[in-house]
């Protein structure tokens, strides 16, 4: 597909990396010539220095031939107008980054009135990911499928959990919970498990199932942590605002520590039920004075990755039950993974998953479209498909089908019910099928069968 990215900041570059990985034809536009030259040399893509509202620039980029335009500069108004102009010049689909909370309240009206195909907000998307982890703090990370009727939860297996050394099928028999091991990461190896696969201490495992079933499994295996009722947020940016707004609606106690005094006043007005404190989150005495140890969870959301890591490590040292760290830069994520941090979230990764789902969905005419997409690591991804009438294997049981060795059906949601798949399970029209696969660039459910 021909994709044009307007705005080559952090989000734009993250999208560029993903699209190149999926062999799309990518052009990047940015007003900063040095940034464009850097990306052209680094990724061997076409780059144009200029403004996203300049008709001459868009014409040079051949916007009329583009399948998808993504405007992700730091200015909401520019992104919206660039998409409107691109659509008038013939672009098939347009996606705009809109970050301002005031704009986002009217986003559906803006999208419909202006003909935008998709609007995304990295900060809001990140806040949603953090909410899901706080709702299920037993896990390092949580991904939601079928409107929350099924989740994929990530855990590290330790000796205390008492199921290391046992096979997947034996664990299922012993604990009797309707959960499925969707993926195992063991050092540099990524394993899509089968019944005879042995789980080892030190493995990172991804469990799929209804939330109550995974919670029951966690209680039986000493993985369980109670839902956080009090949350200490360090950093008062947009992610913090969206997160605190949701937590307060849920009845949680929220404390926000922010170093900018003016921003503190803004947050105090926007979130009157939150406790907003002016102070430096990297100052140990401030954290102690504000009783970080008395909170169920700490979420570090400053604009500095290194600071977030430091604060998180201190919170873990103080035995805060759940610690979530926001990291933007890919290089820091790689290093932080080796520090034993509790849970990591990244706005770039969150929004890249969201947009890849859109791109994959529009890459095929199949009726069985992608509802949800998560890139688990470089070798595996999890997808949710809506089964349409053109699916080749409708009404057939799984034992009748031959599945690729590097693919696994982890669950089926039918109406309000989550179904743990077995050989006798049939795939019906309207089902939502959750799949983990090592096959790259999956666009339709048919591709996981031989």
Image (cartoon, grey):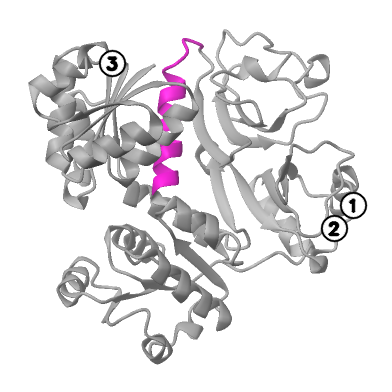
**Residue beneath disc 1:** 166
Residue 448 versus residue 72: which sits nearer the camera? 72
Residue 120 image position (x, y, % from top left): 31, 39
Number of numbered discs overlaid on the protein picture: 3
> Badge 1: how crowded within 10 Å, few (<14), some, or many (20+)?
some
Q: How far apart are the two marked residues, 1 and 3, measured between alpha carbons?
A: 51 Å
Q: Measuring 41% from the left and 54% from the top, which residue is drawn there? A: 329
Q: Residues within 10 Å of mark 2 (few under 14, many from 20)?
A: many
Q: Quadrant of residue 235?
A: bottom left
Residue occupied by mark 2: 163
Q: Secondary structure at mark 1?
A: loop
- Could one spot residue 97 in this view of the protein? no
Asked whether, in this view, residue 244 is left or right of residue 341, the answer is left
Q: Quadrant of the C terminus?
A: top right
Q: Is residue 202 visible?
A: yes
What residue lies at 13% left-to-right and 37% top-to-bottom? 78
- Label 3 packing within 10 angstroms: few (<14), some (14-19), many (20+): many
- Helix, strand or loop at label 3? It is loop
In this picture, which residue range is highlighted in magenta? Answer: 348-366
- Mark 2 and mark 1: span between their CA atoms? 6 Å
Q: Nearer the viewer, residue 211 or 56?
A: 56
Q: Are marks 2 and 1 in contact (CB under 8 Å)?
A: yes
Residue 66 image label: 3
Labels 3, 2: front one: 3
| Image coords of residue 402 (percent x, y) | 79, 16
230 versus 163 height, above or below = below
């Amino acid at each position: 597909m021909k994709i044009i990215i307007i705005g080559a900041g952090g989000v734009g570059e993250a999208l560029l990396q993903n699209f190149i990985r999926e062999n799309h034809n990518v052009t990047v536009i940015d007003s900063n010539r040095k940034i464009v030259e850097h990306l052209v040399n680094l990724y061997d893509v076409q780059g144009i220095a200029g403004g996203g509202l300049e008709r001459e620039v868009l014409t040079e980029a051949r916007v009329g031939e583009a399948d998808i335009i993504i405007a992700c500069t730091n200015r909401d108004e520019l992104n919206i107008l660039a998409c409107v102009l691109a659509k008038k010049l013939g672009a098939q689909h347009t996606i705009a980054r809109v970050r301002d909370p005031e704009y986002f309240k009217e986003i559906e009206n803006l999208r419909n009135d202006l003909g935008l195909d998709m609007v995304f907000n990295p900060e809001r998307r990140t806040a949603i990911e953090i909410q899901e982890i706080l709702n299920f703090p037993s896990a390092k990370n949580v991904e939601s499928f079928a409107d929350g009727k099924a989740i994929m939860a990530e855990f590290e297996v330790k000796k205390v959990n008492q199921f290391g050394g046992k096979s997947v099928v034996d664990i299922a028999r012993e604990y009797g919970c309707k959960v499925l091991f969707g993926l195992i990461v063991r050092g540099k190896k990524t394993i899509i498990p089968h019944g005879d696969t042995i789980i080892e201490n030190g493995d990172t495992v991804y469990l799929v199932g209804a939330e109550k079933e995974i919670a029951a499994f966690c209680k039986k295996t000493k993985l369980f942590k109670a839902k956080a009722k009090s949350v200490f947020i360090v950093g008062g940016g947009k992610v913090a605002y969206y997160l605190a707004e949701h937590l307060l609606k849920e009845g949680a106690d929220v404390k926000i520590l922010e170093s900018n005094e003016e921003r503190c006043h803004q947050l105090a007005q926007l979130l009157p039920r939150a406790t907003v404190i002016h102070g430096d989150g990297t100052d140990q005495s401030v954290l102690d004075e504000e009783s970080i140890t008395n909170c169920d969870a700490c979420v570090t959301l400053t604009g500095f990755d290194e600071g977030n890591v430091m604060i998180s490590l201190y919170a873990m040292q103080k035995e805060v039950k759940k610690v979530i760290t926001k990291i933007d830069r890919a290089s820091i994520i790689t290093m932080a993974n080796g520090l034993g941090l509790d849970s990591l979230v990244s706005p770039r990764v969150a929004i890249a998953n969201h947009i890849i789902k859109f791109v994959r969905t529009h890459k095929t005419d199949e009726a069985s479209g992608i509802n949800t997409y998560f890139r688990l690591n470089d070798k595996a991804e999890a997808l949710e498909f809506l089964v349409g009438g053109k699916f080749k294997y409708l009404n057939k049981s799984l034992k009748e089908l031959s599945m690729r060795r590097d693919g696994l059906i982890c669950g089926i949601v039918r109406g309000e019910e989550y179904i743990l798949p077995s050989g006798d399970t049939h795939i019906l029209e309207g089902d939502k099928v959750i799949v983990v696969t090592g096959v790259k660039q999956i666009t339709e459910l048919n591709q996981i069968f031989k």
